[in-house]
Image: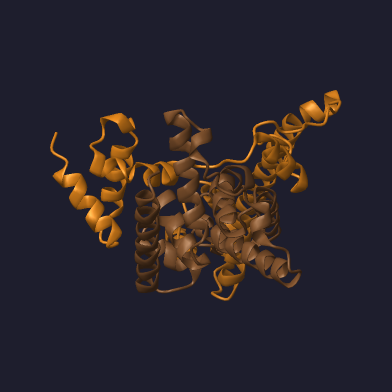
Chain colours: A brown, B orange
């Protein structure tokens, strides 16, 4: 088997890890910290690299757990999570250009996604953004494939519902 | 343009029944300009635009990470220490080869010599046994009489000594 190195096998995963952490923490600075901690942890466990089936899944699992830990800690400190996240600008009159409207719509979808439960959000992120098969997502999250499918179904249904509702208000 | 296929895909997408390939088709389809999409589909454009958005970390993150893990020396450059090489160091392999050759020669010589020594030593020894055997036969005179002759024979043929001395004694 090829010898794994930090630069060629771990570091290139940074953006994928960052996006996953961002979906969970909803904060860019926190997400970057999580990725950094994840990579340090993976680096410190380099003796075990040969026994790892998939470095990507291994890193994603650690990253998700670290992000969830942070959320728990933030919860106990009673910090409002929404405070760090930009509120969607609903005053469309202030954005007359079509492009700006499109940007706002993307932000609205983003906002809808952040309102989903963490499991649904993570499943949707790994499936719809990173393009991972159910099997891999199940391994990363430590749940069954069926549960992954259910989470994705609920996430898409919720998005569709809210999205259609918002559209009806004349976006 | 017929959008039935895409509409079908969207329907199945929300039912979580699409394959990864079909979801890729949807993302690619919605990556085109919104104006070209019919109204019923344009509704979903922002959703797929959001899913296509991929946030990234800056390059300074790489640098920081490599420093923190002590991987900041690029993989393809290896630090090499300068070191002076003396003539004897440079010739060391030659010395080794010479030593091996010398040992082989010495060994060969020693084996050759010992083999020769064995050759020289064994034959007189065999001969030396001859008088001992013959002495018991009571044919001393006959044997003594042919000593010179039989001595010349030694180097040439390995004769059965008893037979030889018998025939010789008969001649006398």
Residue A54 versus residue B85: which sits nearer the camera? A54
Q: Can residue A121 be seen in this snapshot? A: yes
Q: Looking at the picture, does residue A98 appear above or below residue B7?
A: above
In the image, taking residue B100 as reference, residue A16 lies left or right, namely: left
Residue B31 versus residue B171: which sits nearer the camera? B31
In the image, taking residue B34 as reference, residue B116 lies left or right, namely: right
Residue B102 locus on image (x, y percent): 72, 37
Residue A22 versus residue B89: which sits nearer the camera? A22
Number of numbered discs on residues: 0
Residue B125 locus on image (x, y percent): 63, 60
Q: Looking at the picture, does residue A60 appear above or below residue B81?
A: below
Residue B15 versus residue B21: which sits nearer the camera? B15
Q: Residue at x 28, y 49 (%)?
A: B21
Q: Residue at x 30, y 62 (%)?
A: B16
> Would you identify the image quadrant in which residue B109 lies?
top right
Q: Residue at x 56, y 74 (%)?
A: B138
Task: Give the quadrant of the C terminus of chain A.
Answer: top left
Residue B139 locus on image (x, y percent): 54, 69
Q: Can residue B169 be seen in this snapshot? A: no
> Would you identify the image quadrant in which residue B2 lies?
top left
Residue B7 locus on image (x, y percent): 20, 48
Extreme residue toward the bottom, this view = B136
Q: Residue at x 65, y 48 (%)?
A: A28
């Amino acid at each position: 088997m090829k010898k794994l190195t930090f630069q060629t096998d771990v570091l290139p995963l940074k953006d994928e890890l960052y996006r996953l952490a961002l979906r969970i923490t909803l904060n860019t600075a926190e997400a970057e910290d999580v990725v950094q901690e994840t990579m340090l942890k993976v680096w410190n466990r380099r003796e075990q690299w040969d026994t790892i089936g998939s470095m990507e899944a291994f890193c994603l699992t650690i990253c998700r757990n670290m992000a969830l830990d942070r959320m728990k800690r933030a919860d106990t400190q009673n910090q409002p999570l929404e405070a760090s996240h930009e509120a969607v600008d609903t005053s469309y009159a202030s954005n007359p250009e079509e492009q700006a409207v499109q940007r706002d719509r993307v932000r609205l979808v983003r906002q809808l996604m952040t309102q989903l439960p963490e499991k649904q959000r993570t499943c949707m992120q790994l499936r719809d953004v990173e393009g991972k098969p159910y099997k891999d997502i199940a391994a990363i999250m430590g749940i069954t494939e069926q549960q992954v499918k259910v989470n994705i179904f609920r996430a898409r249904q919720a998005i569709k519902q809210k999205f259609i509702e918002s559209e009806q208000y004349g976006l | 343009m017929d959008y039935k296929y895409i509409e079908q895909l969207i329907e199945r997408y929300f039912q979580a029944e699409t394959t990864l390939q079909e979801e890729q088709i949807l993302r690619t389809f919605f990556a085109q300009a919104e104006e070209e999409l019919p109204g019923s589909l344009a509704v979903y454009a922002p959703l797929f635009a959001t899913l296509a958005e991929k946030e990234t970390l800056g390059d300074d993150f790489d640098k920081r990470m490599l420093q923190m893990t002590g991987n900041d020396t690029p993989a393809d450059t290896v630090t090499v220490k300068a070191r002076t090489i003396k003539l004897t160091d440079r010739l060391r392999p030659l010395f080794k080869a010479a030593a091996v050759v010398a040992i082989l020669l010495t060994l060969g010589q020693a084996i050759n010599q010992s083999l020769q020594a064995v050759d020289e030593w064994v034959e007189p020894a065999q001969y030396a046994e001859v008088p001992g055997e013959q002495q018991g036969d009571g044919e001393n005179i006959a044997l003594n009489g042919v000593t010179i002759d039989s001595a010349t024979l030694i180097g040439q043929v390995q004769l059965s000594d008893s037979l030889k001395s018998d025939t010789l004694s008969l001649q006398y």
